[in-house]
Amino acid sequence: MNNEWEKEFDKEWLQTGCNSYGVATKGVVKDMFERLLQAEREKQWKLPEHKGELSITHNGHKSSYESIEDYLAWMKVDDEDINPEDRKKCIETDEIWECQWYPDTPVGFYKIYAPTLTDLLTQLNQKV
């Protein structure tokens, strides 16, 4: 944190869980990043190599008020992207994690889905 804006942002984030635009929630996003950083420090998890973007999304279906079933159908997700047991868990819990990454260029990407962050990271670790 080099400048005053970053210090103020960090202070605001720690107190409210949101930046000045009201983006993010302390409980979900902060916890997710803390777990990812801790896992990386302990070298438990490795992310796949990516020369383009890598993004992790939690509950993308809720942004469009869809059920997980409808969301996965709209995204054309098949058993190669999520196994039937994980699909069932996602539907039962109404929770879904997804990771999309571009290994070589900003054109071609991979995407996987899982019912928990731990399951997602475990799958990603297998892709490394």
Image: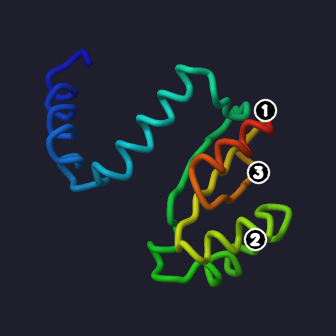
Q: Return the residue at label 1.
A: 128
> Are there few (<14), some (14-19), or many (20+) residues within 10 Å of tag 3?
few
Disc 3 versus disc 1: nearer the observer? 1
**Whole-percent x, y for residue 90 in the image:** 62, 70
Callouts 2 and 1 close, C-beta under 8 Å: no
The first of marks 2 and 1 along the sequence is: 2
Residue 116 located left or right of residue 113: left
Secondary structure type for disc 2? loop
Give the spatial CA distance, label 3 vs label 1: 13 Å
Q: Is residue 112 above or below residue 2?
A: below
Badge 3 amino acid: Tyr
- Identify which residue is drawn at 53% across, 67% down: 95
Q: Return the residue at label 3.
A: 110
Check the image and name the residue furthest to the right.
80
Badge 1 amino acid: Val
**Whole-percent x, y for residue 10 in the image:** 21, 32
> Are there few (<14), some (14-19), or many (20+) residues within 10 Å of tag 1?
few
| Most foreground residue, 37 or 50 | 37
Badge 2 amino acid: Val
Secondary structure type for disc 3? strand
**Whole-percent x, y for residue 43 in the image:** 62, 22
Q: Return the residue at label 2.
A: 77
Give the position of the N terminus as an image quadrant: top left
